[in-house]
Image (cartoon, grey):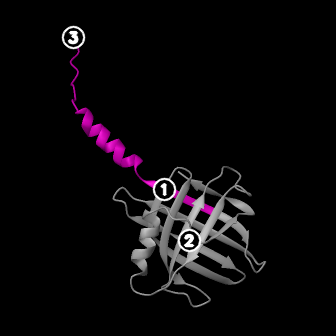
Amino acid sequence: MVSKMAKIVVPAFTLIILFGSLLKAEHVSGKLYLINKAKQNYSAEFRVRQNQDGAAHGQFSFKIGDGETKIDIRYIKVDGNCAWFAGKCSQDPQGRQNSWVFFAVQDGGSPGNLVDYLWVEWMSAEPGTEIQAKGKVDNLERPSESQSINGGNIIIS
């Protein structure tokens, strides 16, 4: 008795393109506990994803006391254990809505206490600022203020 098996031939380049596009997506997330220059404890939480088409989706939020600031992330670039992203502020108790914010994070390992870093640079809401923020991400610039985290973790995958 001879069994007949159907052969399916799929060109190798089809599989490479499929898996290559799946691997291109980048994820950056973190839940951080910090102390600002005014010696206030605050937390930050973010989850950002770069889709296969290069578009960034996600949000970064800060909580100080009862106030919460939210930034909708529009641009991201990942290189090794560092990520850069920028977005537009959608909520802020200090009235900075529509301002652009530029971030960089460094994943120094787990746990993130004193080895993970966060840089933040508030920009204006003026026309043309979005182009400047995107340029900072594209050029992997370092934002003006840096801070090691006191607790939590940054994960770049």
Which three-letter amino acid code belongs to the residue tagged 1? Val
Viewer-closest of 122 and 30: 122
Name the residue beneath numbered marker 3: 2
Q: Residues within 10 Å of mark 2 (few under 14, many from 20)?
A: many
Q: Earlier in the sequence, mark 2 or mark 3?
A: 3
Mark 2 element type: strand
Tell me which amino acid carries mark 2.
Answer: Phe
Q: Which mark is residue 60?
A: 2
Tell me the magenta residue range.
1-30
Vertical relation: 115 (above or below) 135: above
154 or 132, nearer to the observer = 132
Contact check, label 2 and label 3, Cβ < 8 Å = no
Q: Nearer the viewer, mark 2 or mark 1?
A: 1
Which three-letter amino acid code belongs to the residue tagged 3? Val
Q: Which residue is at 48% across, 74% downward?
A: 87
**What residue is disc 1 on?**
78
**Where is residue 128 drawn, in percent x and y?**
39, 82
